Structure formats: structure tokens, C-alpha cells
């Protein structure tokens, strides 16, 4: 009986040993699978690197992506041929992927000071589109031979005698003359531009009759219209412009008989010429 038990124990031991061997063999076989995936991963990485290197080489060197057309969309007619020639000579045949749009924008703005706005877009594979808005002359400062400015106070040109523009008197530059493209930050100029904008928006038919705006007196802006002056003060221009328009439209008032109009008070004062 004891012998039979020993035999059974030995058989059970052999079975357990075979099971452990199978488990070990099975574990070793499963280890091979991650290695295969690792090699697959390496192959994929290699393909990506290959495609990236040769794809980049293709994109940066192929003639397909060299700029062949630069379209300048002009919002007004003040743009001149010089702008188109400079832009074409600078950027034609450049690769569209390596061009920095911000650098092009800065180049255009720095080269052509009278431009107000520049927007650039890439149109693949070989086109640059440029939108340009130029600064339009709005008034001329009666100093240094005439300093033409736009309605925001940016200098458009210097030494230009433009008789079609309304003169702004009383602004002088003793130490430094503003340069082209520079914005003039003077309160009296800002006030005069606000006044002039209001007149053009609400009294446009009288625009041709306005001779000047004088800001020599910081407490009282003078408007020269026809052959008399209008004392505008320094504030509430919209209300005063409406009052002036009513006076000029009054059929009972002859502008040739007016010496001056004072709009600084609640009720406008109309001073007649002395006979």
C-alpha cells in the first residue's frame, strides 16, 4: 500500500514538472511577439523619416512652389507702379513655404510710408495676394512748405503745396520736423481734425468754401469760411457744426454781410460787417 502511494506521488510530481516546463516554454514564446512589434515600429519610423526628408526637399526645391504671380489688390488709385516693381523684384521666384508674411508686410510698410494697411495671403502653389490701402491726403499744415497729413494725423508728404486741401494754421515744429509716415501727436491738431471730419460729414457742400482752420489760440479754434471767421471754441463740435449749417442755410442771412460768427455761447452771435 505504501509502495502504491509512493508511485502515485512520483507520477503526480512528474505531471507537475511537465506543466511547469510547458508554462515556461509558453512564457518564452510569448516574449517573441513584442520584439516583432518593435521591429515594425522601427520600420514605420524609418519610413516617416524618409518621407519627411525627401518630402521637405521636394517642397522647398521644386519649381511648382516658386512664386510666379504677385497679385496686388488696390483699394484706391493712389498706388503707383514703383510699389509693384519693388515687390516683384523682391519676392518673385521665392519658395512659397519659406516666405515669412510678417517680414513682407514690414518690408512694404517701411518702404512705402504712405500705406495705411497691408494684408498678405498665400495662395498655393505659387501665388501671393496683397491687399493695400494707402493714406489719403486730408489736410495740409501751413508750415515748412506744406505738410500733408491724412485724417489720422500721419504725414503723407512734406513740402507739398496742395491748394485743394484745407489749410491748418498755427502748428509749428521748432526742434524736430515730423518725418514721412510719422503720426503727429499734438492736441490742437487732433481737435482740428475732429472739426474738419465733422464738417466733411455734415456740411460737405460747404467744404469748397472753407479757407482754413486756425489753432493758434489753444482756447479758441477759428474756422475761415467765405470771407469771415467762425469762432468754434475747443469742444462740442458736432453741435456747433449743426448750428453753423442752420445759419448758412437761412435764406434771410447774406454771408457777404457777416463779419464773424461766434458759436462758443448758448446762442450763436452773428456780427455784421460795419457799413
Image (cartoon, rainbow, N blue to C red):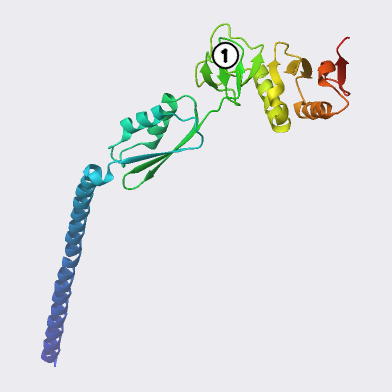
Q: Indicate left or right for 256 with 199 as reference.
A: right
Place residue 262 in its image quadrant: top right
- Residue drawn at x 59%, y 22% as measured from the top left: 153
Residue 88 seen in this snapshot: yes
How many numbered discs, if any? 1
* Along the line of sight, the residue nearer the viewer: 254 or 53: 254
Q: Indicate left or right for 230 with 168 as reference.
A: right
Determine the residue located farthest toward the bottom in the rendered image.
1
Q: Is residue 103 above or below residue 17?
A: above
Q: Indicate left or right for 97 with 182 as reference.
A: left
| Residue matched to label 1 | 146
- Residue drawn at x 78%, y 18% as measured from the top left: 230
Q: Residues within 10 Å of mark 1 (few under 14, many from 20)?
A: some
Give residue 90's position: percent from left, percent from top.
Answer: 32, 30
Query: What is the secondary structure assignment of the residue under circle 1?
Result: loop
Q: Indicate left or right for 120 with 6 as reference.
A: right
Give residue 66's position: percent from left, percent from top.
Answer: 27, 41
- Residue drawn at x 53%, y 15% as measured from the top left: 160
Of the 4 image quadrants, the one containing the C terminus is top right
Residue 263 seen in this snapshot: no
Give residue 2's position: percent from left, percent from top.
Answer: 13, 90
Of the 4 image quadrants, the one containing the N terminus is bottom left
Q: Is residue 217 above or below residue 249?
A: above
Q: Is residue 219 above or below residue 203?
A: above
* Along the line of sight, the residue nearer the viewer: 91 or 10: 91
Determine the residue located farthest toward the top in the rendered image.
174
- Residue drawn at x 53%, y 11% as measured from the top left: 177
Give residue 185's position: percent from left, percent from top.
Answer: 60, 19
* Along the line of sight, the residue nearer the viewer: 227 or 25: 227
Amino acid at each position: 500500500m505504501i509502495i502504491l502511494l509512493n508511485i502515485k506521488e512520483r507520477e503526480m510530481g512528474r505531471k507537475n514538472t511537465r506543466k511547469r516546463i510547458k508554462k515556461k516554454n509558453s512564457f518564452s514564446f510569448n516574449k517573441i511577439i513584442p520584439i516583432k512589434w518593435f521591429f515594425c515600429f522601427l520600420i514605420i519610423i524609418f519610413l516617416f523619416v524618409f518621407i519627411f526628408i525627401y518630402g521637405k526637399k521636394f517642397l522647398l526645391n521644386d519649381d511648382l512652389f516658386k512664386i510666379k504671380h504677385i497679385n496686388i489688390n488696390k483699394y484706391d488709385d493712389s498706388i503707383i507702379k514703383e510699389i509693384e516693381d519693388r515687390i516683384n523684384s523682391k519676392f518673385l521666384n521665392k519658395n512659397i513655404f519659406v516666405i515669412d508674411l510678417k517680414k513682407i508686410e514690414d518690408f512694404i510698410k517701411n518702404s512705402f510710408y504712405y500705406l495705411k494697411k497691408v494684408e498678405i495671403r498665400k495662395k498655393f502653389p505659387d501665388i501671393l495676394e496683397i491687399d493695400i490701402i494707402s493714406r489719403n491726403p486730408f489736410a495740409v499744415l501751413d508750415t515748412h512748405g506744406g505738410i500733408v497729413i491724412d485724417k489720422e494725423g500721419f504725414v503723407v508728404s512734406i513740402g507739398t503745396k496742395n491748394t485743394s486741401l484745407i489749410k491748418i494754421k498755427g502748428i509749428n515744429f521748432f526742434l524736430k520736423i515730423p518725418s514721412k509716415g510719422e503720426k503727429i501727436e499734438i492736441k490742437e491738431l487732433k481737435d482740428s481734425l475732429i472739426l474738419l471730419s465733422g464738417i466733411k460729414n455734415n456740411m460737405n457742400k460747404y467744404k469748397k468754401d472753407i479757407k482754413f482752420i486756425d489753432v493758434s489760440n489753444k482756447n479758441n479754434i477759428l474756422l475761415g469760411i467765405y470771407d469771415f471767421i467762425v469762432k468754434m471754441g475747443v469742444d462740442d463740435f458736432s453741435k456747433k457744426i449743426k448750428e453753423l449749417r442752420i445759419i448758412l442755410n437761412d435764406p434771410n442771412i447774406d454771408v457777404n454781410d457777416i463779419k464773424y460768427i461766434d458759436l462758443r455761447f448758448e446762442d450763436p452771435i452773428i456780427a455784421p460787417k460795419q457799413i
